[in-house]
Image (cartoon, coloured by chain):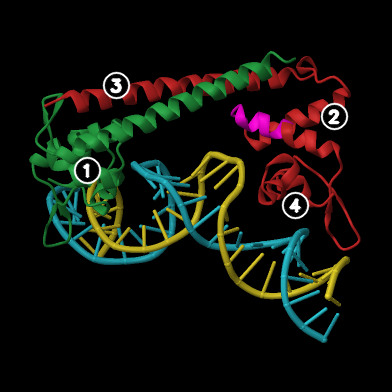
Chain colours: A red, B green, C cyan, D yellow
Amino acid sequence: MQISELARATGVSARALRHYEDRGLLIPGRTGAGYRDYSESDVIRVAQIRAMIGAGLNTATIQRYLDCVRVDGHRPSLTMCPDLRAELDSIAERLAAKQADLRRTQQRLNELASAG
Amino acid sequence: MQISELARATGVSARALRHYEDRGLLIPGRTGAGYRDYSESDVIRVAQIRAMIGAGLNTATIQRYLDCVRVDGHRPSLTMCPDLRAELDSIAERLAAKQADLRRTQQRLNELASAG
DNA sequence: GTAGAGGTTGACGCCAGCGTGAAGGTCAAG
DNA sequence: CTTGACCTTCACGCTGGCGTCAACCTCTAC
């Protein structure tokens, strides 16, 4: 299928799909005219990508995870990728740090707003 | 005083002080040679700026309301600036939204990590 | 053939507070 | 005169997923 069709099927913009290809997350075939030619399985793949982006992973990390899945085969197993475990842990740490930072900011804002 | 002296007195980098001037938050005098010449009161002003940045305000907002905030020692207080209240409320809303967003991200990350 | 819908590859813009050289002027001290 | 410390004004870099032209090619329909 063409890019706009995949865009409609996934709810992701065509620009985003090209961006994923730039980052090596999605590698469609090409027609004779140079048009991108996506398969049905790419719908699922895009859903996976979106899920991981929503979980705070960047595209570089996502690419490593997808490569991992490809090697593993059918069932996605994180035990095949020990490095990914550490990666997810560090991401969780960063999120926790962000949250703590945000709470401190809210605290200071409250102090500012309640002053006077 | 010169910029490095104010930087030491406030714990803020010279680059940041120049940045505050670019944004119209701090307007030092100039010596004959073009050197920035800060006054003692600028030490307090920088403390006010840092307090507001720490509370999540951007430089444009800070410029509008800088004169409304006084820092007595370590504790900021507000003088009469009615619009500032509304501004602070909207900032508080944005912070709350960010926090909710962050929690959703953590939730999705947990789901991903436990999917192995 | 021509209009129009849709495809392609760049490449800059965004949000924002600075970090970090680059290139060069000022000034007290040896 | 010459270090060398400190000052000045640009101006790009950073973080990063994607919006948004721009300039141009492809295919279908009338």
Provide the residue span drawn in magenta: A48-57
The answer to whether B14 appears left or right of A95 in the picture is: left
Q: Can residue A92 be seen here?
A: yes
Tag 2 and tag 4 share a subunit: yes
Subunit ID for the residue under disc 2:
A
Q: Closer to the camera, B19 or B54?
A: B54
Q: Of discs 1 and 4, which sits in the foreground?
A: 4
Q: Position of residue B82 (x, y in %)?
A: 15, 38
Q: Of discs 2 and 4, which sits in the foreground?
A: 4
Give the residue furthest to the right.
A32
Q: CA distance from mark 1 to mark 3?
A: 31 Å
The answer to whether the residue labelled 3 contacts the one labelled 4, judged by CB atoms less than 8 Å apart, is no
Q: Position of residue B84 (x, y in %)?
A: 20, 38
Residue A52 drawn in magenta: yes
The answer to whether the residue labelled 1 contacts the one labelled 3, judged by CB atoms less than 8 Å apart, is no
**Residue picked out by circle 4:** A4
Q: Position of residue D20 (x, y in %)?
A: 56, 59
Task: Determine which quarter of the picture holds residue A9.
Answer: top right
Q: CA distance from mark 2 to mark 4?
A: 26 Å
Residue A92 drawn in magenta: no
The answer to whether A94 appears left or right of B19 in the picture is: right
How many numbered discs sit on the rendered protein?
Answer: 4
Which mark is drawn over residue A107? 3
**Residue picked out by circle 1:** B4
**Residue picked out by circle 2:** A70
Please tell me whether mark 3 sits on a helix, a strand or a loop.
Answer: helix
Q: Earlier in the sequence, mark 2 or mark 4?
A: 4
